[in-house]
Amino acid sequence: MKRRAVSPSRPDSERSAHAERQPRFLGLAAGMLAVALVIYLVIGQLPAADATGLVTGFSTALSLLLLLVVAFALLFLAAYLNSRFGLFLADRGHYLMDLWRVPMRFFSFGGFFTEDIEEEKRLASERKRARHERRRYARMSRKRAVSQQRPRERDDNRP
């Protein structure tokens, strides 16, 4: 009976999940590089200098955005090439989505959906109810402990 070589670090289910995620990282890297190319072409079409300095400021902002996009493209390419890093990023993607949703909701551009809000309200109510039960249990336990204690002998020196 032949035994197949299995990596002890990852089970089969994790390996197959990564196989599904891997092309996504390559697509994200390609998309980021396409956006970087568009930004680069826009920067190239801007005039070299202007009297107000607005074009220079806009060019600087686009250059910083270009650096950011290229950095993300390299990050996604590294996630595609390194399976452990890809799993690390894929498992923590919801944190990035939450980072995006909070400012969008603050500026009223959407962000959290109503289902998320309703779910959060329900979870907050459950947490509040559980906290109330814990405090009630602690109060009852204290009362029970006090009632089971022996009464202290009265000190005659006390007023």
Image (cartoon, helix red, strand yellow):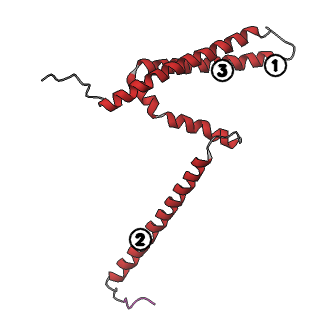
Is residue 93 shown above or below 37?
below
User: Is 59 in the magenta?
Assistant: no
Residue 70 seen:
no
Callout 3: 10 Å neighbours few (<14), some, many (20+)?
some
Instruction: Give the image location of residue 6, x and y in percent.
Output: 24, 25
Left or right side of 144 for 136: right
Spatial separation of the CA atoms under disc 1 and disc 2: 65 Å
Residue shown at 46% from the left, 30% from the top:
90
Give the residue type that dot 1 points to: Leu
Instruction: Give the image location of residue 7, x and y in percent.
Output: 26, 25
Which residue is tagged 3?
A: 65
Q: Nearer the viewer, residue 6 or 100?
A: 6
What is the span of residues highlighted in magenta in the rendered image? Answer: 154-159
Give the residue type that dot 3 points to: Leu
Instruction: Give the image location of residue 117, x and y in percent.
Output: 60, 50
Which residue is tagged 1?
A: 54
Callout 1: 10 Å neighbours few (<14), some, many (20+)?
few
